[in-house]
Image: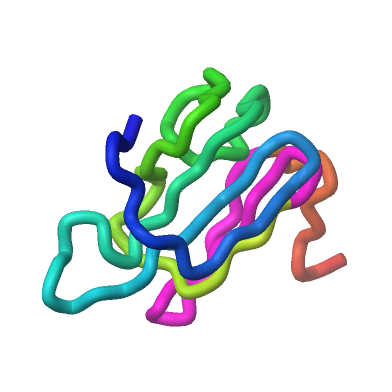
Amino acid sequence: MIEDLPEIEYISCGVDHMLAISRYDPSNNKFTGKTFAWGKNHKGQLGIGNVYSQYSPVPINNTKERFKKVACGASFSLGLSHTNRIYFWGNFKYYCHHSV
């Protein structure tokens, strides 16, 4: 759990979970530009490496990249990194392959 959550720049809300990106501050890289998650996590939609629900913000650890945008679905999450890579985690039930 983060004792002093940094200033939040962007937030996305799903059905039972949320993601937030802290404001980027080049003079302080402790939590700057990091993504935090909380809520239900039964499908791994928080991206924290387990399926235990979290009821206060915790930093996600599915990648070392920083995200510029995130989105939450019912039980999945998406992230667009600063290097323009798209990440998807959580429930893959409705995953659509590019050849479909």
Q: Left or right? Give the position of 67 relative to 33.
A: right
Secondary structure predominantly adopted by residues drawn in magenta:
strand
Q: Is residue 2 left or right of residue 77?
A: left
Q: Is residue 32 or residue 87 the one in the foreground?
A: 32
The percent position of residue 58, horizontal first and vertical second, equals 40, 37
Q: Nearer the viewer, residue 63 or 23?
A: 23
Q: Residue at x 56, y 51 (%)?
A: 19
Which residue is at a point 74% across and 47% down the rendered structure image?
14
For the N terminus, the quadrant is top left
* Quarter of the rendering containing residue 86: bottom right
Which residue shows up at 70% across the image and 51% down it?
13
Q: Could you say where residue 23 lies in the image, as x and y percent from the top left?
A: 37, 70
> Does 44 sit above or below residue 18?
above
Q: How many marks?
A: 0
Residue 54 to residue 85: above or below: above
User: Looking at the image, which residue is at 36% across and 53% down?
Assistant: 63
Q: Is residue 7 magenta?
A: no
The answer to whether residue 8 is visible is: yes
> Percent position (x, y) of residue 26?
18, 78
Q: Residue extending furthest top?
A: 52
Q: How is the image coloured?
A: rainbow
Could you tell me residue 82's position as x and y percent?
Answer: 40, 78
Q: Name the quarter where the C terminus is drawn.
A: bottom right
Q: Quadrant of residue 70?
A: bottom right
**Which portion, as a residue range, is magenta?**
73-90
**In this rendering, position of residue 6 left or right of residue 67:** left
Residue 10 vertical position relative to residue 45 in the rendered view, above or below: below
